[in-house]
Image: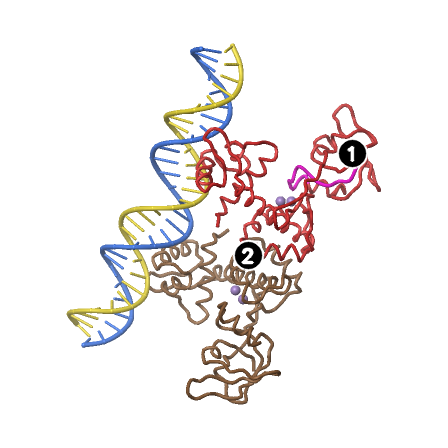
Chain colours: A brown, B red, C yellow, D blue
DNA sequence: TAATAAATTTAGACCTGTCTAAATTTATTG
DNA sequence: CAATAAATTTAGACAGGTCTAAATTTATTA
């Protein structure tokens, strides 16, 4: 149906669209690790196929069709990640690269059966929502830990940064999905925070707090 | 490491090598559904990479390295087929196309864990042996049903034809892997056979008998 | 608002993998 | 063994996706 490159562009446009109505060529180039000129070439192809709305120099947005395809790829990505962690015992920092390949396996029948096999999980190992077979999913209303005050807290439900380094760090600190945390102290000087969990006290930098998402 | 096209060529050369020391350009073109000239181009690339032994006009064979890669792809193909049938409840005639895509997922760690998850199966849904993580596997010594005589028989352990049509036909006749069959009668005229299984009597054509493999 | 900077697109090239048509080599056969 | 047929390779082209360098458009700022 669509090529691997096309699918990756659609997915990237989708992800960048979350915080904006329109996505720029340079944003895409950065995310896709390619050059702006390559992006322009591809945008023309996707516009030709009516998967994106593209006006030269004005950025792009997905059409309804393009968005459907993007969400389907994200569904596949997250279901495979869930499979790798829950069934094959991978750690949450190990699965992204594999899912980047697996998300392009074309069969929808396969992914629907995988979904059933795992009993329709709602969130992937990083706390991101898994779209159902109709592309529907709930958007959790999460806040970064950095945005809450002393004695406030909640349950860790997601991360903003998906890098290996960040995920490994959180794992080592036992700051994983589902953990309950409360802010015990905020250091004025550098905005680092001291968190209280059930079993220990952990100091995290502002950067870490900014990328850690909780539900109140 | 290697491209999708390269992997498919190596796999095809491997499969065609089973019945010959050398594989011809046209054989490959037929199996890969491409043109002889395209095959020649690719053979040059694979020879350059020292994955095949290639002398113009004289056909090709795999080098040790090339064979290792080919066996690894076959391992992946068959393990994924096993997964699709045993865990996701697909029928044996539905899994080949999906496995054609899945076999190119690069991670060996993934496939080794999948292997473990399924408790190291030795044969895929079509009775073909699954190489272990070192590329080792036993070659079953199977015979086509067409080659045995009256009152002889054995257990169905494989098929020569992997086409949907053939697999679906066998399924409908309950002639599936593991079934015990005995030759009750051979029709002189067209060499069709009447088989006796535990629960019924089935007449099959010579063509069907030729592609059905049993262990004595 | 004119000059400069930043973002984006165009021009032209390259690589992979494929194709058709033509040339070449090997096999077959009268 | 020469003529013909079959198999294979070469020549030249093309599509997809990428790149660098140059041109163009839009944004910023003095
Ligand atoms: Mn991921
Ligand atoms: Mn994820
Ligand atoms: Mn198969
Ligand atoms: Mn098989």
SS for tag 2?
helix
**Is residue B186 found left or right of A7 in the rendered image?**
right
**What residue is pinned by disc 2?**
A102
Q: Badge 1: few (under 14), some or many (20 or more) residues near its Cα, within 10 Å?
A: some
Q: Quadrant of residue A80?
A: bottom right
Placement of B137 over or under B21, stated as above or below: below
The residue at the point 53 percent across, 70 percent down is A168
**Image coords of residue C20 (percent x, y):** 42, 33
Given residues A201 and A33, the one toward you in this image is: A201
In the depicted view, which residue is nearer to us: B185 or B158?
Answer: B158
Q: Is residue A82 above or below residue A49?
A: below
Q: Is mark 2 within 8 Å of ligand 1?
A: no
Extent of the magenta region:
B154-166
Residue at x-position 48% and y-position 87%: A186
- Check the image and report above or below for A90 versus D6: below
Chain that bears disc 1: B
Rendered view: A182 above or below C13: below
Left or right for A112, reference B155: left
Circles 2, 1 touching at the beta carbon (< 8 Å)? no
- Per the model, the C-alpha gap separating discs 2 and 1 is 43 Å
| Nearer the observer, B198 or B216 | B216
Ligand 4 resides in the quarter of the picture at: top right
Mark 2: few/some/many CA within 10 Å (<14, 14-19, 20+) = many
| Residue at the spot of label 1 | B203
Quadrant assignment for the C terminus of chain B: top right
């Amino acid at each position: 149906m669509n090529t691997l490159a096309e699918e990756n562009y659609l997915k990237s446009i989708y992800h960048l669209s979350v915080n904006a109505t329109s996505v720029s060529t340079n944003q895409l180039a950065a995310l896709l690790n390619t050059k702006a000129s390559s992006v322009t070439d591809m945008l023309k192809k996707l516009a030709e196929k009516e998967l994106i709305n593209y006006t030269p120099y004005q950025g792009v947005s997905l059409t309804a069709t393009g968005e459907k395809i993007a969400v389907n790829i994200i569904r596949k990505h997250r279901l495979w990640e869930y499979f790798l962690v829950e069934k094959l015992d991978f750690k949450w920092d190990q699965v992204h690269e594999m899912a980047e390949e697996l998300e392009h396996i074309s069969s929808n029948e396969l992914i629907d059966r995988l979904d059933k096999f795992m009993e329709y999980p709602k969130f992937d190992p990083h706390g991101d929502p898994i779209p159902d077979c109709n592309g529907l999913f709930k958007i959790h209303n999460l806040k970064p830990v950095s945005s809450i005050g002393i004695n406030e807290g909640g349950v860790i439900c997601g991360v903003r940064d998906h890098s290996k380094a960040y995920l490994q760090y959180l794992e080592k600190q036992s700051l994983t999905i589902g953990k309950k945390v409360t802010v015990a102290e905020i250091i004025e000087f550098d905005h680092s925070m001291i968190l209280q969990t059930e079993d220990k006290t952990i100091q995290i930098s502002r950067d870490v707090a900014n990328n850690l998402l909780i539900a109140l």
